[in-house]
Amino acid sequence: AQKITQTQPGMFVQEKEAVTLDCTYDTSDPSYGLFWYKQPSSGEMIFLIYQGSYDQQNATEGRYSLNFQKARKSANLVISASQLGDSAMYFCAMREGGYNKLIFGAGTRLAVHP
Amino acid sequence: NAGVTQTPKFRILKIGQSMTLQCAQDMNHNYMYWYRQDPGMGLKLIYYSVGAGITDKGEVPNGYNVSRSTTEDFPLRLELAAPSQTSVYFCASLRGLTNEKLFFGSGTQLSVL
């Protein structure tokens, strides 16, 4: 069964607008962590934001925020004021259980249009 | 600070050949991982290690082997390369805190023809 689901293979947004990238997860472990990574066309993996399952507030990092809805098991990434440089693949990932292993979703390709 | 270093960056193998992908980190991290990323897909865990001398299988270990003789190095061995192993391979590490991000290498693009 899919542990991390990203239902949007591709998204586009106008420059300076906000965009939400969806991520749902499945786990029975009460302790888990959720990550978002950006992969530009150059291929490197860039960490964006982290949310722990016990964190009371939604995580924010600059223009990135994570809309964490625990009961719905969703961890959507919100990018505010999109920039052309935000065009990339975005991966949601979950750390579950021991050994800090991350499970990745299939990704969403975001295109920012001028 | 070099971080996580992977070599080579690109490699073309013939079916049946073997090779070792090198990964080294200079951050004294306990945990190291090998992932593969097929075109247009997410990353899948091949093997991981929680310290020198300790390794375990991930989601897709078939066709690969690893070793961890030192904290710094975590090489991935491909024996009898197959076209299905054409992928981008990422090595990653972290110290061990649960909220800590993975530090990724720059990846190795491997083609098996």
Image (cartoon, rainbow, N blue to C red):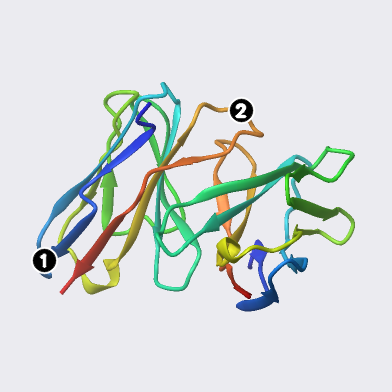
Q: At which x and y percent is residue A62? A: 73, 45
The residue depicted at 28 percent of the width and 66 percent of the height is B85
The residue depicted at 15 percent of the width and 65 percent of the height is B12
Q: Quadrant of residue A90?
A: bottom right
Name the subunit of mark 2.
B
Specify whether disc 2 shares its chain with disc 1: yes
Residue A8 seen = no
Image mark count: 2
Name the subunit of mark 1.
B
Image position of A43 with respect to B49: above or below: below
* Residue corresponding to mark 1: B16
Q: At which x and y percent is residue B38? A: 39, 68
Image position of A106 with respect to A47: above or below: below
Q: At which x and y percent is residue B3? A: 39, 32
Mark 1: give few (<14), some (14-19) or many (20+) Cα within 10 Å: few
* Residue corresponding to mark 2: B97
